Image (cartoon, rainbow, N blue to C red):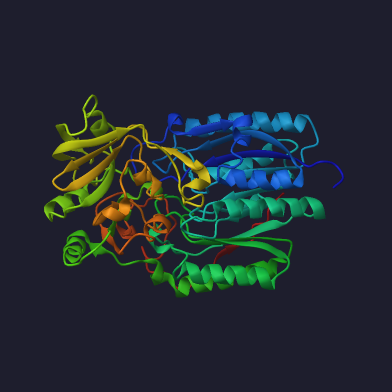
Amino acid sequence: MSETPRILLGGFFHETNTFVSQTTRLEHFAIRRDQALLDRAGDGSTVDGFLEVAAAKGWDVVPVCEYTALPAGPIEHTVFEAFWKEFEAGLQAALADPPLHAIWLALHGAAVTTDCEDLEGAFLRRIRSVPGAETLPLFGVFDLHANFTDDMARHATGLVGYRENPHIDARTAAIRSAELLDRSLRESVLPGMYSCRVPLIWPPTGTDTSASPMKDLESRARQIEAESPGIWSVSVTGGFSFSDVHDAGVAFNLVTTGEETQAKVALASLSDIAWRLRDRGQPEEWSLDAALEDIKSKDGGPWIIVEPADNIGGGGPGDCTSVLRGLLKHEVGNALVVIADAAAVAAFDGAAPGETRCISVGGKGSDLDPGPVDLIATLVSTTDGEFDLEDRQSHMVASQGTHFSMEQTAVVRAQGVTIMLTSRKTPPNDLAQLRSQGLEPASFTVIGVKAAVAHRRAYNKIAAGSYTVTTPGPCTSDLKSLPYRNLRRPIYPLDHVGYPAAGESSKIKGEG
């Protein structure tokens, strides 16, 4: 291509837990427009990965807008319409000042609004409805926990998923997708996407890529890429089981210029592995009481109590109280928990360190939780809750970047337990969260962590061991207990399902 490629940039990032009653509103989104989107360069995000390639290739980037929010309940549909209005205006303006050579998008893949269960698919379909954008190369990156739909494949040229959980490679995946866009432009060829789903759904706790079944599937995906020059990229999608949508669950997709038969054979081989190893995606968990009793029999620490039912990275409120209650009940000293509770933080307004107050902690964000815990707590410290991540490959960097705000934060102690109270829920994926408040995680005997897998990159480095426990909450690993209404059925392990010889395979070739 002799002229400088002109590439439109935008994004929408939200992982939607439809089992959380509170909706995600416009004020919950960080919105970056125009220059602010370009200013993500260097922040470790997926957009940063794209911008690195764009700079190296000399592209003329046309930034429009990016909306990002922490995982939470269904998005108010008006948010999507506001986003689309902005994006469409930017796209039409770019098309009116030709040439526009391509579009690149930073996506999640599991966004659900109050009126639309496939936001990304609807977004891509709308892009293709804009005159002049029908056949533009459209590339992007998406999360390993996407619920990949036919519309996502049908209307994209090449979407590339993360390969790691914890998501240490989100920026790398964005670079990979941008390099595929460059290849498409240089070779003047438009690949297409093929996808298939398996009638299988795993909780996030079953999608650690360092262990089977995901490790086996990722290995096979890389083998397919090595064996098949026409296949540019293969993505293993673990799915997001807390979105009650038709297409939730395990899926595979690939970007290729090859034949349909080759694509279907490759996808079928992945489906076969997933089905054969289906039970390995259903992890066993401890009871909280048994875990705490076992810890009390041990020396050293820290021992990590992992509470996936209140997984902040999966949309949990971050204020469930079961682990706190357990620590108090079992009189476990030198323990630490983090609770998102702005009201409890505010209860210490005007207090000095060492001052004691009666507070009501947590239990407000989920009807499944036993409710608030009333405590007499002593204030240790208060801060503005701002911190820079220590790990630029932290799971949370993909959308949030390397700086995070917990907002007003208070550290208190009650009955031997240190409680870090934050005004904004914060995924426990980086130890700087604790160290920024003067808390050295290695000094505690027990730490409660509201996560599934994403915390491991940080906490495994310091932990003597960990216990994943069953507690009540909206991100339970017991998927049979969730009130699915929209999920396609039958699906394993919710139902008895016969062997799917080739998954729910479909030929979905991108129109771009």
Q: Residue at x 16, y 53 (%)?
A: 333
Q: Position of residue 281 (x, y in %)?
A: 40, 67
Relative to 330, 351 lies left or right: right
The quarter of the displayed image where residue 163 is located = bottom right
Q: Residue at x 34, y 66 (%)?
A: 283
Q: Position of residue 368 (x, y in %)?
A: 24, 47
Please say if 283 is above or below 327.
Answer: below
Q: Position of residue 467 (x, y in %)?
A: 28, 62
Relative to 454, 144 lies left or right: right
Q: Nearer the viewer, residue 416 or 276?
A: 416
Q: Position of residue 68 (x, y in %)?
A: 50, 38
Q: Is residue 254 visible?
A: yes
Q: Residue at x 73, y 68 (%)?
A: 229
Q: How many marks?
A: 0
Q: Nearer the viewer, residue 251 or 173?
A: 173
Q: Residue at x 46, y 57 (%)?
A: 166
Relative to 161, 468 lies left or right: left
Please say if 273 is above or below 346.
Answer: below
Q: Is residue 152 visible?
A: no
- Residue most extreme to the top: 350
